Amino acid sequence: MYKTLHTDVTDSIFTVTINRPDKLNALNKDVMSELSQAVDEIYENDEIRSAIITGAGTKAFVAGADISEFLGLTREQGQALSARGHDLFFRIASCPKPIAAAINGFALGGGLELAMACHFRLCTTNAKFGQPEVNLGLIPGYGGTQRLTQLIGRGRAIEIMLSARMVEATEAHVMGLVNYIVEEQNELLTKTRELLSIINEKGPVAVARIIECVNIAAGDGAFFGSAAVWEADPFGGETRVEEGGAVRNGFQREQEAFGECFGTEDMKEGAKAFLEKRKAVFTGK
Ligand code: COA
């Protein structure tokens, strides 16, 4: 069905493997468009409870956007490319079903941005992380300036983006960029599946509302609509102004979402199961 992806559903976990190992799984137009379809599947297929995004081979998760597609782009086309990447990665970040990045090697540029759009990250000891766009006279364009700052803090994020240096797995772990490191490549998917299996046993409504409220806290609370308008800035660039972009109040949203959980069968089942000293069985209702 897909040309550049391999996909599989096992035990309600959808695994998406980006499959261009000879180009270190670089994100070209085809990969981006197929990833978008795969994300639609995650949203729409009721058999899928959670997902993993990984790369084929042992060398790279994703070594960035495909640089061979950059030459010849105009300023407007560059901005449109960025906007498409933003929309796709925003859909990953705001997906109500958890999506984990399993990072098997280089996660550079758009590859790190893809990993950071996922809800959490696991990697192998040989993983290397970076935002090397500045080496190309560019900046991260698929959300990296925002998500790296959210995840590791402003000082570290700026230094990594300005220097374009590679960050080893152990440093990435200390910074909070990855949740777990595994020693061997073959443990990576096993460990990721173990973690998602634990989450898959929880009530889906509660899982979705936690993701939503945390995203608001992380700064994704402003409405991200297609009706964005741009204003000239004094340095010859432009500043994006969101129409209707009132920042949502995460504390307020948490109260509503907490109430929404009380409206589910799963919440009643969870509380009853605790009191009856048995394991809860959640149905998503
Ligand atoms: N876009 C397009 N092609 C890429 C790519 C990218 N981001 N990253 C790697 N490739 C291609 C290489 O051009 C090469 O293709 P070829 O065999 O047809 O020449 C192939 O993948 C293997 O990469 P290579 O550079 O030979 O591997 P390496 O082990 O010597 O170096 C990297 C690995 C990751 C250090 C190096 O590929 C690299 O710096 N990639 C670009 C990273 C980057 O700047 N990403 C941000 C883009 S915005």
Image (cartoon, rainbow, N blue to C red):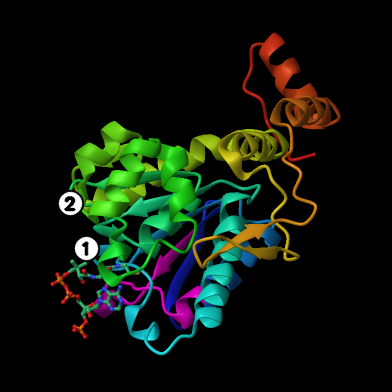
Q: Secondary structure at mark 1?
A: loop
User: Is residue 18 visible to the viewer in this orientation of the structure?
Assistant: yes
Identify which residue is drawn at 83% across, 25% down.
Answer: 259
The answer for how far apart the CA atoms under marks 2 and 1 are is 9 Å
- Residue 138 position, x and y percent, is 36, 68
- Residue 241 position, x and y percent, is 68, 57
Q: Amino acid at mark 2?
A: Asn
The quarter in which the C terminus is drawn is top right
Residue denoted by label 2: 126
Residue denoted by label 1: 58
Identify which residue is drawn at 27% across, 32% down.
Answer: 174
Is residue 106 shown left or right of residue 281?
left
Q: Amino acid at mark 1?
A: Thr
Would residue 25 be counted in the magenta stretch? yes
- Residue 72 position, x and y percent, is 41, 90
- Residue 98 position, x and y percent, is 56, 46
Which residues, given as a range, are shown in magenta? 15-32
Asked which quadrant contains residue 266, the reply is top right
Q: Nearer the viewer, residue 8 or 220?
A: 220
> Tag 1 or tag 2, which sits nearer the N-term?
1
Asked which quadrant contains residue 68, the reply is bottom left
